[in-house]
Amino acid sequence: MRAPRRVFAWAASAALLGAPAVARAAEPGPDALPITVITVQTDTGDDQAEALTKALRNAVRAMPGWSLGEGDFSLEVITLSLKCSEPPDAACQSRIADQIKSDRYIWGMVQKKKDNTIKGEVSLWVRGKGAVKVPLDYTANLTEANDDALKKIATDTVTQLTGGPPKGGVKIKAGTAQGQCFADGKPLGALKNGEATFMIPSGTHKITVRAQGYADAETLVVIKPTGSATEVSLTLVPAEAKSATNWKRIGGFGLVGVGVGLGVVGLVQSLKVNSLEADHNVETGDMYLYRKLHPKSGNVCEDAKSDDSDLGKKVNGYCNDASGPQLLQAVFYPLAAVAVGAGAFLIATSGSKKPAKTGLTWVPQAGPGGAKLDVIYAW
């Protein structure tokens, strides 16, 4: 197996050197950076290496901020054409980048072991930074790129190699406020004189600025991994102050309500007394007859208490009936007046204080003793 593979590799390397270099795919836009994925090299696990290569390419395509560079390059072919060692050293890795015209590429070497596992490592080379490596060790049964287990291995590998989506700058401007900035609810840092610049993963994010005394300001922004920082301008609107409960006004209206209720009770008692008086003070009434028979009585009710006559007993009963409502009148009317007065005072004084006026104020006054004009200056 080894000899035929070498013959094929030498033939392919000759074609690679004699043909113009394959250009990578144009970037889909300034929102993504290209990564070329070179076919993973193996001597003992062709199916597994092919599936892993496809899974790695799919993982690069799916990750925000990255795009897949064009070209189906073979690590074995390239290393033979460039006369590199296996695995290629740092100098050769740089030459590979020049050969495939890529600033970053993923390459790897794996082997199928006797215990039916795939072992090896995958590396990401970035121009100016060198390479980072991630070891691999998984079951050799994963021979399909769309297998969920292999897709997870590829995604985790690309995430470890790249650190996730590439980052881009966001420059936040919010007037001159001193507040805190958040991306998707996660804190970024503080504003200084209303401005700040942060590095966050590329893609769409919700930027929020929170400052004391202002309502939260939010906006959506697309962060690009290339070019200058994306600028975001937010306008902070003063937060409406929550009006405090005016307990003084509430208490005032409550007292007025109580006063009205007490007044109603007193009025009911007055009507009862008036009704009794109307029933007994007519010419046929008992009270009228008793007064006729005792014209010199100073207090009819007091005299009726000691009068055992039938008429005296009737008048005494009337006086007893009227004494209760009369007492209630004497109690409820004053209480009603006090409650209404106190409530009215609380209502009148519950409004917000107006700022004192400055300057001259002319106050005319008139009374029994004459009239005058006061001049007041406030500052």
Image (spheres, rainbow, N blue to C red):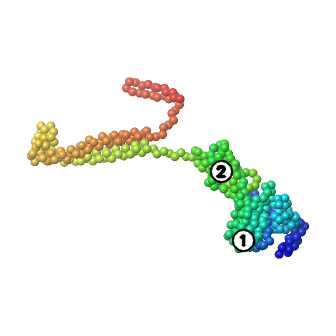
Q: Quadrant of residue 74?
A: bottom right
* Identity of the residue drawn at 72% across and 73% down: 116
Asked if residue 379 is positioned above or below residue 5 in the image, the reply reads above
Q: Is residue 373 left or right of residue 152?
A: left
Q: How many marks?
A: 2
Residue linked to disc 1: 117
Q: Amino acid at mark 1?
A: Thr
Of mark 2 and mark 1, the one earlier in the sequence is: 1
Asked if residue 366 is positioned above or below residue 334 in the image, the reply reads above
Asked whether 306 or 72 is in front, the reply is: 72
Label 2 to label 1, Cα distance in Å? 43 Å
Q: Is residue 62 left or right of residue 21?
A: left
Asked if residue 335 is positioned above or below residue 170 in the image, the reply reads above
Q: Is residue 146 left or right of residue 290?
A: right
Q: Is residue 262 left or right of residue 313?
A: right
* Identity of the residue drawn at 69% across and 56% down: 201
Q: Does residue 57 appear anywhere in the picture?
A: no
Q: Position of residue 182 (x, y in %)?
A: 63, 51
Q: Position of residue 145 (x, y in %)?
A: 72, 71
Q: Position of residue 211 (x, y in %)?
A: 60, 46
**Pointer 1 local density, CA inside 10 Å: few below 14, some 14–19, many at least 20:** some
Asked if residue 99 is positioned above or below residue 274 in the image, the reply reads below
Residue linked to disc 2: 188
Q: Does residue 373 appear anywhere in the picture?
A: yes
- Describe the element under mark 2 as helix, strand or loop: strand
Q: Position of residue 19 (x, y in %)?
A: 89, 67
Q: Amino acid at mark 2?
A: Leu
Callout in the foreground (2, 1): 1
Q: Quadrant of residue 334?
A: top left
* Identity of the residue drawn at 83% across and 63% down: 88
